[in-house]
Image (tube, rainbow, N blue to C red):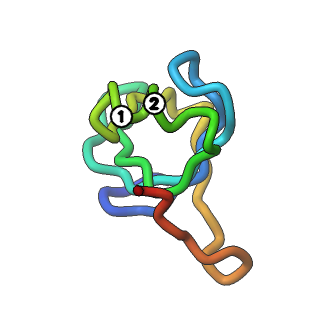
Amino acid sequence: MIKLNDVVKCQPNGNLTCPFVGTVERIYERTVMVTVTEHHPNDHWKLMELMGRVIVGLDKVELHDLQLEPVRSQAQ
């Protein structure tokens, strides 16, 4: 079950072309709003256009295991 402020790993959703990691900011019926904290460099400009936030379907989101991979911000 996804909750607010969970760190999640997301599959590409149409806006971004590569998987990304972020924090759940809002939860809707079938989607969540994620603030992206780690992403592929190819998605940098699209993410800037989206102001760092992406709506993702719940079926494309899974909890991110922080013990295996630390989350790093790619902001420059």
Residue sitting at x 64%, y 29%: 12
In the image, 60 versus 68, the foreground residue is: 68
Residue sitting at x 47%, y 64%: 73
Which residue is the extreme one toward the front? 76
Q: Position of residue 48 (x, y in %)?
A: 35, 34
Q: Quadrant of residue 10?
A: top right
Residue labelled with disc 1: 48
Left or right of 16? Residue 76 is: left
The amino acid type of the residue labelled 2 equals Trp
Q: Which mark is residue 34?
A: none
Which residue is the extreme one toward the top? 14
Residue sitting at x 60%, y 31%: 59
Q: Position of residue 56 (x, y in %)?
A: 47, 30
Q: How many marks?
A: 2
Q: CA distance from mark 1 to mark 2?
A: 5 Å
Circle 1/circle 2 CB separation < 8 Å: yes
Residue labelled with disc 2: 45
In the image, 54 versus 74, the foreground residue is: 74
